Image (cartoon, rainbow, N blue to C red):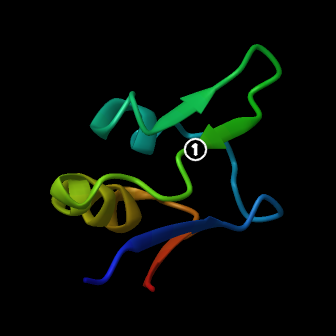
Amino acid sequence: MRRLKVVVDLDRCEAHGECTRIAPDLFRLDEELDLHWEENPPGDRSDDVRYAVEACPSEAISVDEV
């Protein structure tokens, strides 16, 4: 069974927060606007993860299947 691996390019992330609105349990901005994320989200969250990838205005999020 394939799993998702979320990859975030922190050099590209501009802390717009679109991912945190889509999946606040998987993506979180702290007080300094640093992004934290679930690297290996549950398989049943793949739609939310892919939506967050598409919604990121700086294209900082990608997902691989491992």
Q: Quadrant of the C terminus?
A: bottom left
Count of numbered circles on the image? 1
Q: Is residue 48 above or below residue 25?
A: below
Nearer to me, 9 or 42: 42
Between 54 and 3, the one nearer to me in the picture: 3
In the image, residue 41 sits, relative to residue 16, either above or below, namely below
Q: Is residue 22 left or right of residue 35?
A: left
Q: Is residue 20 left or right of residue 58?
A: left
Residue at position x 83%, y 21% in the image: 32
Image quadrant in which you'd find residue 2: bottom left
Residue 57 point in image, percent of width and height: 48, 60
Q: Which quadrant does the N terminus fall into?
A: bottom left
Q: Report the residue at 74% width, 28% height from top.
A: 33
Q: Which residue is mark 1?
A: 37
The relative height of residue 8 versus residue 36 in the rendered view (above or below) is below
The residue lying at 50 percent from left, 74 percent from top is 62
Residue 5, position as x, y percentages in the image: 49, 71
Left of 57 or right of it: where is 32? right
Within 10 Å of the Cα at label 1, are there few (<14), some (14-19), or many (20+) other Cα atoms?
Answer: some
Instruction: Identify the residue shown where x is 24% and y is 61%.
Output: 43
Disc 1, SS = strand
The residue furthest front is 1
- Above or below for 65 versus 24: below
Amino acid type, mark 1:
Trp
